[in-house]
Image (spheres, rainbow, N blue to C red):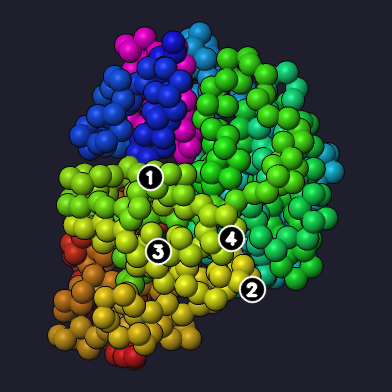
Amino acid sequence: MHRILIANRGEIARRIIRTCRSLGHESIAVYADPDAEAPHVAEADHAERIGPAALDESYLSIDAILAAAERSGATHVHPGYGFLAERTDFAAAVMDTGMIWIGPSPASVASMGSKIEARSVAERAGVPLIPGYNESQDDAALAAAADEIGYPVLVKASAGGGGKGIRIAHAPDEFATALAEARTESMRAFGDDDVIVERYITRPRHIEVQIVADKHGSVADLGTRECSVQRRYQKVLEEAPAPNLPVETEVAMRQAAVALASGIGYDSAGTVEFIVDAGSDEFFFLEMNTRIQVEHTVTEQITGVDLIALQIAVSDGEALPVSATAWDEMRAAGLSHSFEARINAENPWEGHVPQTGDVSTVAVGSENDGDAVRWDAAIESGSVISPHYDSMVGKLVVTGTDRIAALDQLTQVLDATIVEGVVTNLDFHRWLVRQPEVRGATVTTRFLDETPLPSASPFDGSPPDSPWTTRHARRMTPHRSGLAYASPTRDGSWSGAGAAGAVGADVRAPFPGLITAINIAAGDVVEAGQTLCTIEAMKMLHPITIAGSATVAEVLVEVGQQVDGDQPLITFDTPESTGETQ
């Protein structure tokens, strides 16, 4: 029997605990103070406190987690996803203690951990690459490369993943801002601000291949997943297998993924991600995630393979339990189809504002209905959602005999699911799965950028007309001053008091978070569209901008300060000009 410490929290910790229990292994949870009463702590066989809420003192502290492993007598460590999952120093430190690391070797993680190095490895393996530049980190050299590649370009973090540290520059005058923002977000998320500049494909699909491998040189794939429904590079709805792919494209993509994994001596579960041009069906290497993915669930549902159990087995030196031809054999026998909807604590009708508070009720429609409905969640009735961690609170996974059957079933289960006490994006998903592009499998990663959202939930009697203008913003006018502040824009930025309810000429925090940057000072004259400050909430950076011109009277906060929702941040003197109200 193993004693497996799970260096993570929330739904993925509960997911790993479930497999540990099924295999007869003991599970050890870790928790920071806000998670002391969390479900994953209660469900584990043993739990260890690792520190306060601050990530660098808890879930990102290698020393704290290793100390917990030593106290609890852990024999294995599973990192889950995010946090320390792709940190080679963590993997090496675990192995140095004599414990078994449930994940790929540090060397293979390192080769894919930097997107710059990963591009070189992929090129050597013959995997198609998007035209890009990473030879220098000098700002001028990167700008010159962008000019040569041709706009629009994508500026993206070399380290990490999860959609963080990515910005688009559509023209040369946008490049400096895109570069600065990508570097800042990357440094905060991954401790590394190196970037790559690449050609931006205007009609991209995001397709990935699930890879499994062992320590004996065997590598296989378990098919494809479609992850094109995204908001701000964060996946929203995933499915397996990927629909509407020409056979030759799918086969070549899977072969490329296996070749890449084989070339780095990969020895666990992982995912190779590709961009597919929706117009030409050309595919290009995006990145490799050397860990279990959030959306591993849909692959498990259609293949019957427990990927966590597989990770544990190969970490112990066992042979890969599936063959190199497993996917083709499954397809020939007839595959089902599966969708995963990520349920987040956020208000989708107000710019996806992160939500916190007490969850009074969780009731999933047809929960655990055989293999058809699966609910992997961080919460249950009575849980508390804090502002310290990611906003995803659950994954609703529904499987059917074919794609339309699965989508119809997902629609029915979403309609019957209730989460009360905290606003979630459940109604957003109810709207999403009814869109013709989703039903017709024609979405690209631009879909949510190009599709007007309802002004409020279409499912609670609110008017169906949308307030989004062609500029993708909504505006309100504070009663006292007449200065117009825009509320959340479709790209995730926020503007002035309208973001949290206009009160005089104050700018107030739209949600609890951490002030990470202040771009103005008392006495400054600010212009429409200018960024005033940036708030980090639930692991994302949110710029606060202004919709009209004004003079700053007082800055009430400082960098590094934790703020509450609706807390005043900045005040203004009488505005110099009145913004337009729409």
Alpha carbon distance from label 3 to label 4: 14 Å
Where is residue 126 drawn, in percent x and y? 84, 43
Q: Which residue is mark 2?
A: 171
Residue for badge 1: 368
- Please report whichever mark, 3 or 1, sits nearer to the chain's N-terminal start: 1
Secondary structure of residue under mark 3: helix
Residue at left offset 58%, top offset 45%: 302
Given contact means CB atoms under 8 Å apart, are the residues at marks 3 and 4 in contact?
no
Find the magenta span and give its range.
56-85
What residue is rendered at 21% in x and 58% in y?
420
Residue topped by disc 4: 403
Give the spatial CA distance, label 3 vs label 2.
Answer: 44 Å
Residue at 63 percent of width and 14 percent of height: 317
Mark 3: amino acid? Gln
- First of labels 3, 4 by sequence position: 4
Query: Residue 205, image x and y in percent?
Result: 65, 62
Query: 491 above or below 283?
Result: below
Q: Residue at x 75, y 42 (%)?
A: 328
**Front in this rendered view, residue 316 or 231:** 316
Magenta span contains residue 261? no
Query: Helix or strand or loop: what does disc 4 sit on?
Result: helix
